[in-house]
Amino acid sequence: MKSYKAPRGMRDVLPEEMPAWQRLEATAHRLARLFGYSEVRPPLMEETELFTRSVGEVTDIVEKEMFSLKKGKTSLTLRPEGTAGVVRAYCQAGYAKRDPLQRLYYCGPMWRYERPQRGRERMFTQFGVECIGSADPRLDAEAIQLACRFFEELGLTGLEVRLNSMGDGDDRDRYRDAVRGFFEPKRAELCELCQDRFERNVLRVLDCKNPSCQELAIGAPVVLDFLSEENAAHFADVQVALKSLGREPIVDPGIVRGLDYYTKTIFEIHAPAIGARSAICGGGRYDHLVRDLGGPDVPAVGFAIGFSGTLIMLEELGLMGDLKPVAPDAYVACLTGGDDDAALRREVLCVADELRAAGVSAIFDVDERSFKGQMKAIAKGGYRLAVIVGEDELARGVVQLKDLGAREQTEVPRADLASAAKGLLGG
Ligand code: HAM
């Protein structure tokens, strides 16, 4: 018989791993709200063209990595990133007219057909924020601060915040020309893909993963040298704001983001311990994307953090602690071996149900284990309470309630079980 596996680069998050994931999710939700961000949940698929237009036609994501499918005349794509969908939702909801400044966040799966490797998966989770509606450099700093806080709250240290500016408008055009001029004489030596990039989107040559292209790119013009006065001032203001928040980012002109929509500030947070592709957060400003997707001309800034890299870091630094799945509060056991075990087994289902109705989580034995076997399961399971139902107890309308921590057992009337259990649990 064929056995089935999850698709390559996609994985199951099993219950044992869930506490760590839930910690990341809870931290994301809490921090985002603390910074005034509201959750948004766009569909996991969008029209393919939305990504082509926003991420850029000549990018790895669009050229190689999208999971697309065609239904009728429509081509849909599983979102490879969250920004495009959030901006589309912002436009569709008409926020620009009624409440233009929106701080929005999301947490969920994204898909990219990448070569799976450490920290890189084909289905991965991002926590992202998008602050749409203002060009204020304090918001760039705020986004970076929020991303840093996320990692700090998890106990992660040794991270590097790398900052750059992509410029905008004329300075970007002049920079593009300079990069074209730089690569012109080396054109024939570039990889096949970069020869095409040279024609269609020369800045993407700087982002090529091919080592020989990376070598050819050494000494390429640096975008910071081309910034207009206004954009240089914006970049300086972002740095001043970050300094006043106590952050010392590394200005790294080598940062080129893999998406085309960025303008002005771009940043990445790196965990060098992960290895070559060590970015666990990437983001920046995208002042024209809303307009380019058919909305009004409103500026925006945001970032996304990858959970895979973050979890690797947590493990590497021994910060997973003893995060364990939480066992149900109570285990309902039955004292079998009497005249009517079947009746007893029916009754444990009802006892568990009474506990659940009162808010006490409970499970019961389903393996028809001996009473001794059930006691062994209780000892291993991490429960706080055991409820023992026996024939004699059933006849008298009582059960035995055992506080497994205090190792104390009391007989309680069945009608009082739920409140007694809650009392022992402290609630
Ligand atoms: P990105 O740099 O493509 O930016 O992704 C952000 C983060 O998602 C990366 O730093 C990495 O941690 C994680 N990530 C990306 N691809 C994978 C993968 N295949 N497997 C595991 N983790 C991955 C964006 O996605 C932008 N939308 C960020 C943004 C929001 N910019 C402005 N607003």
Image (cartoon, rainbow, N blue to C red):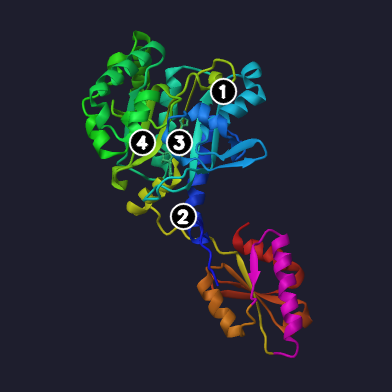
Q: Residue at x 56, y 30 (%)?
A: 50
Of badges 4 and 3, nearer the viewer stands: 3
Residue 37 appears in the rendering: no
Question: What is the C-alpha distance between the residues marked 2 and 4?
Answer: 27 Å
Residue that mark 3 sits on: 63
Q: Quadrant of ligand 1?
A: top left
* First of labels 3, 2 by sequence position: 2
Q: Quadrant of the N terminus?
A: bottom right
> For mark 1, does the 10 Å Cα neighbourhood hold few (<14), some (14 to 19), or many (20 or more) residues?
some
Q: Amino acid at mark 2?
A: Arg
Question: What is the C-alpha distance between the residues marked 1 and 3?
Answer: 19 Å
Of badges 3 and 2, nearer the viewer stands: 3
Q: Residue at x 48, y 19 (%)?
A: 287
Residue 231 located within the stretch drawn in magenta: no
Say which quarter of the image contains residue 342.
Answer: bottom right
Residue 58 position, x and y percent, is: 43, 30
Question: What is the C-alpha distance between the residues marked 3 and 2?
Answer: 20 Å
Viewer-side residue, 85 vs 201: 201
* First of labels 2, 4 by sequence position: 2
| Residues drawn in magenta | 338-366
**Which disc number belongs to residue 8?**
2
> For mark 3, does the 10 Å Cα neighbourhood hold few (<14), some (14 to 19), or many (20 or more) residues?
few
Q: Amino acid at mark 1?
A: Leu
Q: Are marks 1 and 3 in contact (CB under 8 Å)?
A: no
Residue that mark 1 sits on: 293
Residue that mark 4 sits on: 269
Residue 242 position, x and y percent, is: 36, 24
